[in-house]
Image (cartoon, grey):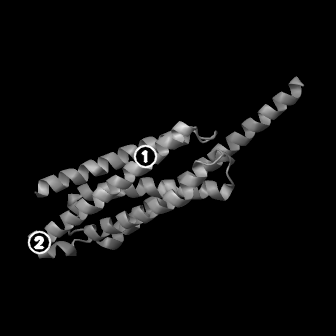
Amino acid sequence: MKTLVIYAHLLAACVSIGTLLLQDLALWRSRYRVLTQDEINTLRNTANIVFLALVVLWATGSGLVTMGYFENPEFFSNQKIWAKISVVIILSLNGVFLHFYSFPKIVGNKAILQLPSADQKWIGCSGALSTVSWLFACYLGIARTWNYSVDYSSIMLLYAGLVFFAFIVAHEVMRMSRTIHIANLNMNERGDRDTV
């Protein structure tokens, strides 16, 4: 039974990560233009798939934690488990933020780079937090050598450092993209004036 639960847990994680990374790449490619209706539909389908996968991950993860406790009452002294639960809670709360804040902005009538700077920053940071959290939670799932050997604060400090680094990268990438976008608009404007 435990093997089947682990298998379902891994499948849900793979589906989530694969779907999210492909969708993030598609959104990045469309940052200069408004999304088409097909792209909006794909984004909504992706959100539904990830939501279902997250429900499966919570259910199977809870099952694995329960089984772990019954197999070994010392199970909850494994600090890595608490760190993984914390990261998954953050990931889930960020998913709510993405759904109710970022997605409505992305599917609106403006390209990502045409949105106000504050919106771009929130979208970039929530996307960065999502990617780091999913990848880190998956890593914690396979980091067997950290069981009972690495304390909670060390794991969460590493996670916080990765999130901070991802925020800086997201901010700089958005800033450079904005600069390039504005330069292209100015060049096109000058070209239009020259041809008149």
Q: Name which residue type carries label 1.
A: Thr
**Could you tell which of marks 1 and 2 lies nearer the N-terminus?**
1
Taking 195 as reference, is 125 left or right? left
Location of the C terminus by quadrant is top right
Give the image quarter of residue 83.
bottom left
Please say if 178 is above or below 144.
above
* Residue 35 screen position, x and y as percent: 59, 40
* Residue 153 screen position, x and y as percent: 35, 73
Query: Residue beneath label 2, please?
Result: 70
Taking 116 as reference, is 30 left or right? left
Give the image quarter of residue 59.
bottom left
- Picture residue at 31% right of the left edge, 72% below the top: 152
- Picture residue at 41% right of the left edge, 65% below the top: 90
Please say if 187 is above or below 120.
above
Query: Residue beneath label 1, please?
Result: 46
Give the image quarter of residue 74.
bottom left
Q: Name which residue type carries label 2.
A: Phe
- Picture residue at 73% right of the left edge, 36% below the top: 184
